[in-house]
Image (cartoon, rainbow, N blue to C red):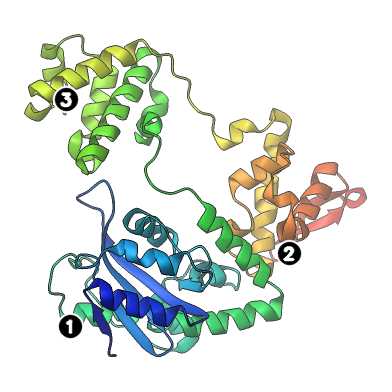
Amino acid sequence: MTHLWIEDDLALDEVIDEILLQSRYAIDTEFHREKSYYPKLALVQLKWGEKTALVDPLAVDPRGLARLFESDILAVFHAAQQDLEVLRHASLVAPKNIFDSQIAAGFLGYSTPSLATLVQAIKKVALSKGDRLTDWLRRPLTTAQCVYAADDVAHLLDLHDELSSQLNELGRTVWVTDACNDLVARPSGPIDSRLAWLKLKEARSLKGSSRGVAQAVGQWREERAMRSDHPPRRVMSDMALLGIAQRVPKNVEELASTRGVDDRHLSSEFCKEIMTAIRDGAQRTVELPSHESDDVEKWARPALTLITAWIGELARKNKIDATLLATRSDISAFLRKSPDARLMHGWRAAVVGEDLSKILSGTVGLSVDRDGHLKLIEADNA
């Protein structure tokens, strides 16, 4: 496959001018985030018509892509969530009108397939095998790397055609549009640094001042990681953060003897900041945020399990990925009768919500047939 290698802003503008004359384009990205806090965009692959371009964001200003992303032209992705986050960071914007072939496939019985699996299933074509751990920031890229990268967009427009046809036959086009719009609207980027401590596996076991210290030192670690553009665990390990939270060191000597703390943390700059965070955290009163299930009234908690099972059955019968029908958060919102509950609106209300209302009202019950599948039965027969 031939492709254009784009390494200057003028060439990028010419590519965008061409794509803006189209109704759609395929897009993918390559990036790294293992050694940095923010993802490092390493390559942008674009396909329109019969042309493919590999855009080098190390040589051109990726903000030049904003002109394309702000247009209404359809951007066809596969598994777009991380791509959208990376593009928002590098280009300041991301495509607003998207079609995600992985989401679309989930509404057609494919669960959440990889691109290679979906291309093989629909086009009977095997994608080129590349090194999953390849260094996309290295220049120049090898021929094999370029072929692998171009392959990621080579079939997306064909997948869009085929999946759209199947969705149209089943009347599920609007479902996918809604799901893709939800993905675009989903927040991305850095988390609230005050909530960073909750990423610790043992966070919920901490009590009293230990919880406040974990929050304060976790917040310090997250903000230090943002400023230095390093992964949080390179600033301070989880072991050290947890050890500090459990011990609550009162002085530098106690900090130095805490498991996981190293010489770097005892440097004048780090030590002062850490001890300040410890003292601040020890005075905080921190409440644990509730689990999604905690937001449900006690009477409804058994219904949470029952409804989750029925949604799984509906997903099986309709050949839809269950997470696309409803998440646990969706079910909790429905049980709380939240006016914004997704199960009370649109296609989800028709596919799922009506059954759930009947179950909760007691007009129908659930039974298991001989094949082990759930079915609704009239309450009088329950």
Furthest-right residue in view?
380
Label 1 sits on what residue type? Thr
Q: How many marks?
A: 3
* Image location (x, y in percent) of residue 317: 69, 68
Q: Residue at x 30, y 63 (%)?
A: 62
Q: Nearer the viewer, mark 2 or mark 1?
A: 1
N-term-proximal mark, 3 vs 2:
3
Marks 3 & 2, CB-CB < 8 Å contact? no
Assess disc 1: are there few (<14), some (14-19) or many (≥20) residues with their C-alpha within 10 Å of its C-alpha.
Answer: few
Callout 3: SS: loop
Is residue 70 left or right of 293 when viewed as pictured? left
Q: Quadrant of residue 67?
A: bottom left
According to the image, label 3 marks what residue?
Answer: 259
Of 20 and 90, which appears nearest the observer? 20
C-alpha distance separating marks 2 and 1: 56 Å
Q: Residue at x 20, y 33 (%)?
A: 236
Assess disc 3: are there few (<14), some (14-19) or many (≥20) residues with their C-alpha within 10 Å of its C-alpha.
Answer: some
* Image location (x, y in percent) of residue 181: 57, 60
Q: Nearer the viewer, mark 1 or mark 3?
A: 1
* Image location (x, y in percent) of residue 40: 25, 57
Q: Residue at x 59, y 50 (%)?
A: 327
Assess disc 2: are there few (<14), some (14-19) or many (≥20) residues with their C-alpha within 10 Å of its C-alpha.
Answer: few
Q: Say which mark, if any, is on residue 370.
A: 2
Callout 2: SS: loop
Is residue 370 left or right of 59 when viewed as pictured? right
Label 3 sits on what residue type? Arg
N-term-proximal mark, 1 vs 3:
1
N-term-proximal mark, 2 vs 1:
1
According to the image, label 1 marks what residue?
Answer: 143
Compared with 161, 316 (above or below) is: above
